[in-house]
């Protein structure tokens, strides 16, 4: 018989201060300020890498992709540091 999954995050087996979400990401709690800043920088780097990997590989195609009015407005009015 199949067990029903609860809506609560599961505790990780590795450490007592981590949670594993449904998507499989591990979230640490009670981290120091340095660890939180480091995690934020790593998350930003992952987002930027994902964006850059979605761009066309040829330089002139990347330029045309970025100059599209819809994407240019989204970039110009975004809160992300560039």
Image (cartoon, grey):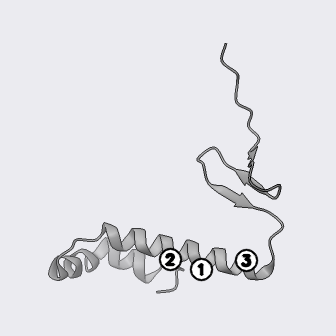
Q: Quadrant of residue 68?
A: bottom left
For this orientation, the residue located farthest to the bottom is 82
- At x 28%, y 78%, the residue is 66
On the image, the x and y values in percent for residue 6 come to: 74, 33
Instruction: Say which label, 3 or 1, has the lower sequence index.
Output: 3
In terms of secondary structure, where does tag 1 sit? helix
- At x 73%, y 77%, the residue is 35
In terms of secondary structure, where does tag 2 sit? helix
In terms of secondary structure, where does tag 3 sit? helix
Instruction: Say which label, 3 or 2, has the lower sequence index.
Output: 3
Q: Is 37 placed left or right of 53 in the picture?
A: right
34 or 56: nearer the eye? Answer: 34
Structural crowding at the residue carrying mark 3, measured as other residues with C-alpha within 10 Å and reported as few (<14), some (14–19) or many (≥20):
few
Please give the label number shown on residue 45. Answer: 2
- At x 74%, y 45%, the residue is 9
Mark 3–mark 1 Cα distance, whole angstroms, equals 10 Å
Mark 2–mark 1 Cα distance, whole angstroms, equals 6 Å
Tell me the quadrant of the picture where the N terminus can be found.
top right
Q: Is 66 placed left or right of 82 in the picture?
A: left
Structural crowding at the residue carrying mark 2, measured as other residues with C-alpha within 10 Å and reported as few (<14), some (14–19) or many (≥20):
few
Q: Is 3 placed left or right of 54 in the picture?
A: right
On the image, the x and y values in percent for residue 52 come to: 35, 74
Q: Is 4 placed left or right of 82 in the picture?
A: right
On the image, the x and y values in percent for residue 19 come to: 74, 52
> Contact, CB < 8 Å: mark 2 with mark 1?
yes
Please give the label number shown on residue 41. Answer: 1
Q: Which residue in the structure is indicated by mark 3? A: 35
Please give the label number shown on residue 73. Answer: none
Q: Is residue 23 above or below residue 48?
A: above
70 or 31: nearer the eye? Answer: 31
């Amino acid at each position: 018989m199949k067990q029903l999954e609860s809506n609560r995050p599961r505790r990780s087996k590795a450490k007592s201060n981590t949670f594993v979400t449904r998507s499989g990401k591990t979230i640490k709690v009670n981290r120091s300020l340095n660890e939180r800043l480091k995690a934020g920088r790593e998350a930003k780097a992952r987002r930027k890498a994902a964006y850059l990997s979605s761009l066309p590989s040829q330089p002139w195609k990347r330029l045309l992709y970025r100059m599209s009015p819809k994407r240019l407005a989204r970039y110009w009015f975004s809160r992300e540091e560039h």
